[in-house]
Amino acid sequence: MSVRSVLTIAGSDSSGGAGIQADLKTFAANGCYGTSAMTALTAQNTTGVQEVHAVPPGFVEKQIQSILVDIETHAIKTGMLYDAENVRAAVKALSGHYDRASMPPLVCDPVCVSTSGHSLLHPDAIQALADDLFPLSKIITPNKSEAELLLAHCGMALKITSLDDMIIAAKNLLRFGSQAVLLKGGHVVASMGDIFDVDPKSDIEVVSHGLPLENMEILRVGETENLWPRLVVDVLCESGTEPRAVKTTLFIRPFIHSSSTHGTGCTLSAAIASRLACKDERLPLPQILLPRVRVLLVAKSNTFDSIGRATQTIINVLKEIATHKSFCKSYGITEDMLKRTPEVAATSAYGAYLIDIGLQGDTTKLLMALLACLLGYGEVGLWLKKEAARPASWVVLEGNPYKPWMDDYSGEGYQGAVKMGLELIEACAAADPPSKARYKEWNEVWQRCTRLEKGFWDAAMAAA
Ligand SMILES: Cc1ncc(COP(=O)(O)O)c(N)n1
């Protein structure tokens, strides 16, 4: 996958903890390339905002245009927009470049007031946010005071003091037209008692980070019923396909007492934008990994002949992936489902080991690691073919959905590749006969890969 780009349209924080600076660091930490359009300069530090210098709206628009015409952008986040004119300039630049359907996911953090209490948004900008920006947004991420301000703007006077209030507020904020609302906790005191009070029939899902949901009793800090530790609960409301269907998820975590909260909101929304930028594009490891490991093999080759052979194996793997996708399709598994399926731990372990061996430098060792897979499939293919040929065999080929799979691995093409792999490793070993110690190393790689390969097959069996 090419590096994913994320654009932040936000203010600069001279102290580096919030705003554009926090966003760019968060994009980088999430493996994304960050671009930025600045809406305002702030002179601020962790104690407060000393001065704000707005960027002219025409220049906000220009910065966004310059980025979008040149750099493919996979997600966008907005932070401090400062005033109505800058909100409109951002919307104009985005709508001028994308139509509704082609716009990458937009995360809108409606920054209104800094943690230190300084206003970062002119009051007249709220109307522009609500009218022009929220409807374009995949998600808006207000905190308690921003949510109260936004709701007051549409005539709903709600002081958010409990988890119930948060859920009501988040649902109502969906009225502004974003696809989802994440109302951030932290400022609202909540505890496990509140989570227990959630009606199990209410369709509200609870997702816990680092808390054993099934064994909450161990968290109780005192004998009395209500002595639970404080929690942070973030409330996510997503509008459904049906007009009235709203999905609500509560993300719960233990509260961390800290004064280092400057920029936490910017960081969270930038992290969400980064993950959205990568969503659906990160192929499951096995699909992407084999070609990548084999590219390492090409890189280690030092003759035209060996470069050609290693390149051919990449083409073979790509063909194999295409065949597997079409098998999956015939079993009713779409490409989209494949992309969304998280890899099992056995696959991650195998993949990480292959990449590691590939980076270590020894071509024969890498070949050895790859052969465990190549030969394993070849052996299984031949074995199943032999079993199927026996009278009244347990392997019935007729009508078997895996017949094309078995034919493939026992067939001439794949068996030819197995033969080539074996010849290649023999040739490598003959050209550079290993010392006893090196031979032992190869042997260990082979055994380890075989074990990892078995783990990978067992994981499939366990899921079946
Ligand atoms: C430029 C800029 N953007 C956003 C924030 C909000 O961050 P926080 O609420 O953590 O002060 C900030 N202080 N400065």
Image (cartoon, rainbow, N blue to C red):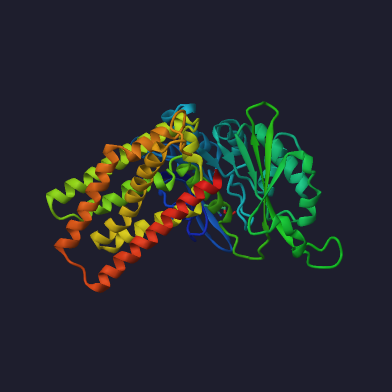
* Nearer to the camera, 208 or 61: 208
Q: Position of residue 125 (x, y in %)?
A: 59, 38
Residue found at x 39% / y 37%: 389
As drawn, is 404 to the left or to the right of 170?
Answer: left
The answer to whether residue 103 shows anywhere in this view is no
Toward which corner of the image does residue 263 lie, by quadrant? bottom right
The answer to whether residue 264 shows anywhere in this view is yes
Residue found at x 58% / y 59%: 262
* Nearer to the camera, 202 or 328: 328
In which quadrant will I find the N terminus? Answer: top left
Residue found at x 12% / y 49%: 304
Q: Position of residue 324 (x, y in %)?
A: 39, 36
As drawn, is 464 to the left or to the right of 32?
Answer: right
Residue found at x 46% / y 45%: 8
Looking at this rendering, what residue extends furthest in the left direction? Answer: 304
* Nearer to the camera, 184 or 367: 367
In which quadrant will I find the C terminus? Answer: top right
As drawn, is 356 to the left or to the right of 243?
Answer: left
Looking at this rendering, what residue extends furthest in the front direction? Answer: 391
Toward which corner of the image does residue 25 lie, by quadrant? bottom left
As drawn, is 449 to the left or to the right of 252?
Answer: left
Q: Indicate whether 336 appears above or below 462.
A: above
Q: Position of residue 259 (x, y in %)?
A: 63, 65
Q: Indicate whether 129 appears above or below 229.
A: above
Q: Position of residue 111 (x, y in %)?
A: 58, 47
